Amino acid sequence: MRPEIRDRPDGAFFLINTALNNESNSASLASASTDPGRDRAPAREVVDQKTLPGTVPSDDTLFVIEPRTGSMALDFREIWHYRDLLYFLTWREISLRYKQTFLGVLWAIIQPVMTVAVFTVFLGRLAKMPSDGVPYPVFNYLGLLPWMYFSNAVTRSTSSLVNSSALISKVYFPRVLIPLSGTLSALADFAIAFVVLVVLMLFYHIIPAASTLFLVPLVMLTALAALGAGMWLSAVNVKFRDVTHALPFLMQVWMYATPVVYPTSIVPERWRWVFALNPLTGIIDGYRAATLGRPLDWQTLAVSTLATFVMLAFGVRRFSKMEREFADIV
Amino acid sequence: MTGPIVSARGVGKQYFLGRGPRGVTSLRESLTDIVRAPLRRLRDATGTSGDSFWALRDVTFDVAKGDVVGLIGRNGAGKSTLLKVLSRITDPTEGRIEMRGRSASLLEVGTGFHPELTGRENVYLNGTILGMRKREIDRKFDEIVAFSEVERFIDTPVKRYSSGMYVRLAFGVAAHLDPEILIVDEVLAVGDAEFQKKCLTKMSDVAHEGRTVLFVSHNMAAVRAICSSAIHLAQGRVLAQGQVAPIVEEYVKRSVGTAAASLTFPPRPDKPQFTNIALRSTTTEYGGFVDVDITLRAPTNSSAAIEIEIHDSRGIPLAYVSTAPMGKTFVSMTANEDRHVSVRLGPLPLATGQYDLYFWLARPWAEEYHVTRTPLSFEVVHSDPSESGFEFRQSYGRGAITVPMEYSVR
């Protein structure tokens, strides 16, 4: 929004009686006004979704505005009604991501490639980190791919609400769409980074296994984990901007607590279950097993999946509890 | 359809300032609160709080279908809060509002517009933000673009738009919403005169189609012209609701002649001086008066003229008046005795806006005894010189004074 418009103190509101029946208005205006019935249909569609049976005539909506108490679940019907907005918000995030950059979308390739190069030199070559018998770059990239998506998605979601303060204080829509669009838009970068994975594997003469298809549910699981963390952190960030400053550090620590640069096999057997409580552990193990066609550690994946859903439930709960204050404090 | 389309009962909105159950200030405190959630709920229930105030309290009103309701009130009366509650942006603290029909609110023109995106992209983004569906926008797209008169630039990023084009496009989207209940802040107050006429026509079309409009405005002329009823808010409460004319009249009357203002000066031993200058009222309207009570004092028997300058809000002198315009007749003062002078300025042919008064006690062209450095301000709250529904405002930048005009057409 341009400041000169928003800040206009008390702008002109010229009102001339003759303007009300002015005939010199454009044809489009006239046509807009002559057929009021035509555009009514979509309104009725909303109506039907929201009608409370028995309280009002069937072609009427009843919206009730009251203080909300307790924690509320997400209103999926409402989110569904606003699905077009989710689409445009996500699309906006994606299309603005690399605007006004010289290298543009190449950044979605450069970032993971440079990261994997650094890890390969320092951990793979110099520290001789074991990599389960796969060339270290491939091994590492299979961990970095989901991790970078997760980290990107959480970071974008976390700042999303604060960045959308102008929207939040001026118009109503389900607030969850904002962190959700952050999580979804990061999938675009994931898709580009995935192409790099294919190139890398071909370079090392590793053919992706048929079980690679199992990545589809794994990607969804990663997105849910990111959404859970992102919803909670974004809501807290509205009140305490401390989150913005703590997040990079948190993400770094979280990465080293996740088998991104090292294999799960170097973790002592009796501590594995603790590791599996980190949703990303099971997910990353799953990525590697599926792509390389190795046996999947179902136990770890089950614990991590459960942890993901717990984290998501917690995120949703905290978010919907804090949601009603956003407009007052953002 | 019978019964009100909007009905509010006992609506209140409380804000907490600083510390309190809902206004936790430190992160540490909040973290312990999360851990001890049950305890926090207990505290919430007891309702102990730090500083709090009610931006709205006990607001009850009904709006009939097809009404165009003007919400009026001074700054801080709770108009914006009520709009936010009605738009579901923020929850009320108490009370209940029932709305029968799809509502859309316009608290700002161009919410969510992004400068990097093209006009077309922004239309879709802004439209969905306002609650439209994509195919609804598809259907109205050409109409919106034609209405906004930006056809040639629709695929240009809006950061390249002039501010007029930007506003027209944003309003174009908003004008094509089709809600049963439209909630509008003074967002129409943008753009050039030509475009505003267009917006207004659109607004009155909306009203004629039987839609319900809630319209917040400071502009009494606009409220008079387009509203069918009005609600007067003061200090978060509904003061009056009903027919437009009496409510607007009452509002203007209440605004005119409320707060007084004065300047006091310590006595000086050497020269004649003002000891007190007071405005009986700091507000007036077009054609109204400003009454000033002045107290003078002098160390010796003497006489002087009182001169007054009226400046507009940008500090530009507009008018000069004096008790001794020809420099001949002066106000006489007896040594060390108060002399009271009442001055009435007006009828004032002024535009809506703020004005400053500066005072001189002097013998014009000879000697200045006392000049006030800080002004006394008054406000013209309503100005409709031609009684045509045209609010004449200082902020239009077309002057602050009107003069009588006669014309003949041959």
Image (tube, coloured by chain):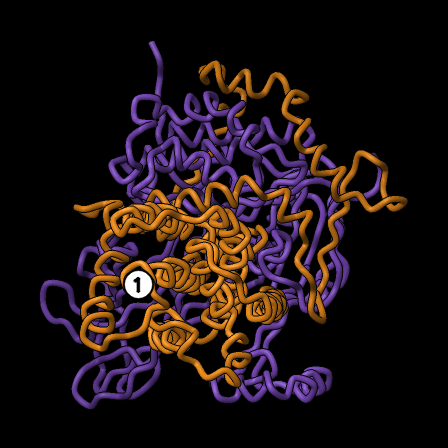
Chain colours: A orange, B purple
Seen from the viewer's position, the closer of residues A135 and B379 is: A135
Image position of B295 with respect to B249: above or below: below
Q: Position of residue B269 (x, y in %)?
A: 20, 90
Query: Could you tell me which residue is drawn at 39 percent across and 35 percent down?
Result: B121
Q: Nearer the viewer, residue B22 or B53?
A: B22
- Which residue is drawn at the image coordinates 47% and 59% (left, top)? A294
In this rendering, position of residue B354 left or right of residue A320: left
Q: Is residue B340 visible?
A: no
Q: Is residue A137 left or right of residue A259?
A: left
Relative horizontal placement of residue A3, taking residue B139 as reference (left or right): left
Q: Residue furthest left?
A: B366
Seen from the viewer's position, the closer of residues B106 and A259 is A259
Residue ID at (57%, 50%): A173
In percent of width and height, residue B182 lies at 61, 40
User: Which corner quadrant holds the N terminus of chain B?
Assistant: top right
Question: Is A126 drawn above or below residue B220 in the view shown?
Answer: below
The x, y position of residue B93, in whole percent, is 68, 69
Residue at coordinates 59% horizontally, 53% vertically from top-left? Answer: A174
- Chain on which label 1 sits: B
Indicate the amino acid at tag 1: Leu
Q: Tag 1: Cα neighbours inside 10 Å, few (<14), some, or many (≥20)?
A: some
- Secondary structure, mark 1, is strand
Q: How many marks?
A: 1
- Residue A165 x %, y %: 44, 59
* Residue highlighted by disc 1: B357
Instruction: Name the quarter where the C terminus of chain B is drawn.
Output: top left
Which residue sits furthest right? Answer: A54
